[in-house]
Image (tube, helix red, strand yellow):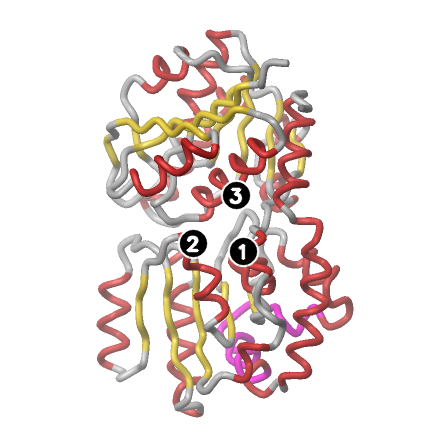
Amino acid sequence: MQKPVIVQAVHAFPPSIGGIETHVLALSRAMVAQGAQVIVHTSTCANSQSIDLPLKDEGILVKRHFFISLPGFSSTKIIPFLCIHLMLENASVYCSHGFGAFVPFQASLAALLKRKKFFWTIHGVPKFSGAKKIFLSAYSLVATIPLAISKKLICVSESARENLPLFAQKKCKIIPNGISVDFFASEPGANNSKSGFKIIFVGRLDESKGVWLLLHSFEQFYFAHKDSTLCFIGSDEGTKQKMQQFAKEKSLPVSFESLPVQEMSSAYASASLTVLPSQYEGFGLAVFESWACGTPAISTPVGAIPSFYQDAFGADSQKFIFKDEKELLQKLEDIHQMSTTQIFKYAKNAKTALKQYRWEKIAKDTLELFNLQT
């Protein structure tokens, strides 16, 4: 039996760092493990051979193309002639990722012209202000084209679905993000015994991700807890320099890192707490990965996080959710005071709840939606 060929088109792919990049890589591996052939079309990236060559041996072919990038938006990479490149593939289905990217337009057109099914995975609808808000409004209007072309829309959470037009919501299938097995190696509560209290943020350094909320809260928290440090892990979206200057002026122990995917489990495991202060998230992957590593995570009530916390902690779910700077500061205090025994209990419950987010299951559900059971 011939393997189905799944052609994925995405604006960025590892070694680029980001939630969508991680999703596409892990999903591709899981689908190959279940008998599919995967081809990924994406943009060029420095040091990409370190990823592309090993993936080829695994059965994932990555094809990279020159792109033109619009300033201020990490996902707005325009890949000239991508539609033609995609049409040259002998695809069983086409799929693309990311609301706010241009790549799904080209992928949907290629699928339409080739008379193949197109699937669009929505990882979340951004919330912007100012000029970015104008761009998003214009994008949302034009996005009705690929939304209409798509056979089905895959949303990583109910929150991601609710922000789409009503006609698109009816085409949605909720298939959550997955958690790599690499994140399940740490023992629950092991990090709490380390000296010092290390707080980490994982995600893009963008104002909509709540980075300033976290930085201002940490300033107050550090005044009372000199054993604490804060590390921002992720790509810069234009705020890093101002944040560094603020931390320097206030003499705060704040660092900034950009780590490859394979080092993220160690980053979570070395932390005492992960904080996700986002204004919006399609899913909230950092929270799930952190708990999988046995490291507590607190967050704003975004993406799939509220339902996950309810499943994992029941009546205690609100202990890990905050809405503003005052509540965040209180949650930092609460986690700082938790004993190793308490951390172990919560992390154990979280890991049990995380079983439904294994990539093997996510890939199976996705292939069934594609009607490509292997």
Q: Which residue is mark 1?
A: 182
**Front one among 248 and 114:** 114
The mark that comes first in sequence, 3 or 1, is 3
Q: Is residue 364 above or below residue 232?
A: above
The residue positioned 61% from the left and 68% from the top of the image is 321
Disc 2/disc 1 C-alpha distance (Å): 8 Å
On the rendered structure, is 261 left or right of 185? left
Disc 1 residue type?
Asp
Q: Which residues are magenta?
A: 317-334
Disc 3 residue type?
Gly
Disc 2/disc 3 C-alpha distance (Å): 24 Å
Rendered location of residue 214, percent (x, y)? 43, 71
Q: Are marks 2 and 1 in contact (CB under 8 Å)?
A: yes
- Label 2 SS: helix
Q: Is residue 194 above or below residue 265?
A: below
Disc 2 residue type?
Gln
**Front one among 133 and 232:** 232
Q: Which mark is residue 262?
A: 2
Rendered location of residue 243, percent (x, y)? 28, 68
- Label 3 SS: loop
* Residue 374, quarter of the rendered image: top right
Q: Which residue is mark 3?
A: 124
On the rendered structure, is 10 left or right of 274? left
- Label 1 SS: helix
**Magenta part mainly helix, strand or loop?**
helix
Rendered location of residue 47, percent (x, y)? 26, 43
Q: Is residue 84 above or below residue 168?
A: above
